[in-house]
Image: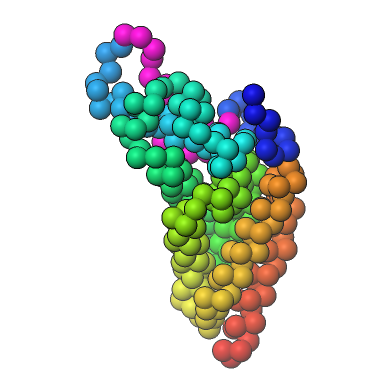
């Protein structure tokens, strides 16, 4: 039996199991064993969802390199033939898992920011939500921030696209600031500085098995973001 590659990470979301709490938009419910009356398409969709969740579970506990298709199908309670029906190989399964995880994580910050009116508050809330969400979903943090670096070139390309998407959300805050009459133009370097700093803290805490405490880094990143926006407003003035 493999030993867990990472230190134990306490889950702070009561009543949720590893990874099933992470991909909230995947409407998962285990397909019943034995005879059932589900349509073939629904059975196939549920099998695919279980495989994606199993990938996240395996990668977050033992690492991408050590995860095998045998591990994934065992956790998903399916077969190799079902796996290959949905994915060409382990890499493709990981890429889809990564895509869904990052999409949900970005959406969580956007939805939280949508509930506050001022652009400064949106910046603070978006950052705070990122750290809190990662603390509550350690399997997502380990998979998308740590293990993505071990999953090959295509995974790194996927990470680059995800970071660009995240940068666009911060650029959107700058647009709102200008609409409010504040002349800010932080630019790509400022957006990247905010994002890379936040991700670096999550990476560090994930490796140390302290993801439940990574929220303590949110105020520092919020201050960094405000200073970059403020410095640009001063220079523009």
Q: Is residue 4 left or right of residue 68?
A: right
Q: Is residue 61 above or below residue 166?
A: above
Residue 11: percent from the left, percent from the top? 67, 34
Q: Is residue 3 or residue 164 the one in the foreground?
A: 3
Residue 189: percent from the left, percent from the top? 56, 76
What residue is at 61 percent from the left and 50 percent from the top? 146
- Quick check: is 21 in the magenta stretch? yes
Q: Is residue 220 left or right of residue 237?
A: right
Q: Is residue 115 or residue 194 the one in the foreground?
A: 194
How many numbered circles does the render carry? 0
What residue is at 68 percent from the left and 47 percent from the top? 206
Residue bounds of the magenta highlight: 18-35
- Quick check: is 57 in the magenta stretch? no
Q: Could you say which quadrant of the image residue 100 lies in?
A: top left
Q: Is residue 99 above or below residue 170?
A: above
Question: Predominant secondary structure in magenta?
Answer: loop
The quarter of the rendered structure image containing the N terminus is: top right
The quarter of the rendered structure image containing the C terminus is: bottom right
Residue 163: percent from the left, percent from the top? 50, 62
Q: Is residue 173 above or below residue 178?
A: above
Q: Is residue 174 or residue 53 the one in the foreground?
A: 53
Residue 53, can we see it? no
User: Coloured how?
Assistant: rainbow
What residue is at 57 percent from the left and 70 percent from the top? 192
Q: Is residue 154 left or right of residue 37?
A: right
Q: Is residue 35 or residue 152 the one in the foreground?
A: 152
Residue 75: percent from the left, percent from the top? 51, 25
Residue 191, can we see it? yes
């Amino acid at each position: 039996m493999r030993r867990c590659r990472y230190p134990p990470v306490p889950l702070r979301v009561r009543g949720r199991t590893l990874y099933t709490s992470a991909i909230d938009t995947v409407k998962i419910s285990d397909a019943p064993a034995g005879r059932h009356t589900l349509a073939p398409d629904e059975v196939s969709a549920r099998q695919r969802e279980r495989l994606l969740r199993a990938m996240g579970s395996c990668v977050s506990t033992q690492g991408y390199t050590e995860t095998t298709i045998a591990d994934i199908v065992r956790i998903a309670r399916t077969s190799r033939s079902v796996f290959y029906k949905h994915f060409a190989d382990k890499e493709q399964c990981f890429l889809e898992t990564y895509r869904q995880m990052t999409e949900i994580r970005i959406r969580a910050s956007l939805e939280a920011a949508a509930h506050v009116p001022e652009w400064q508050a949106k910046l603070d809330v978006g950052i705070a939500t990122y750290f809190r969400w990662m603390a509550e979903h350690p399997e997502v943090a380990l998979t998308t921030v740590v293990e993505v670096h071990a999953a090959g070139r295509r995974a790194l390309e996927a990470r680059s696209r995800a970071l660009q998407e995240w940068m666009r959300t911060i650029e959107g805050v700058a647009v709102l600031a200008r609409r409010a009459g504040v002349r800010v133009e932080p630019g790509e370097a400022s957006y990247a500085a905010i994002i890379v700093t936040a991700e670096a803290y999550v990476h560090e805490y994930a490796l140390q098995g302290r993801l439940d405490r990574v929220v303590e880094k949110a105020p520092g990143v919020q201050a960094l973001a405000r200073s970059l926006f403020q410095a640009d407003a001063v220079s523009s003035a």
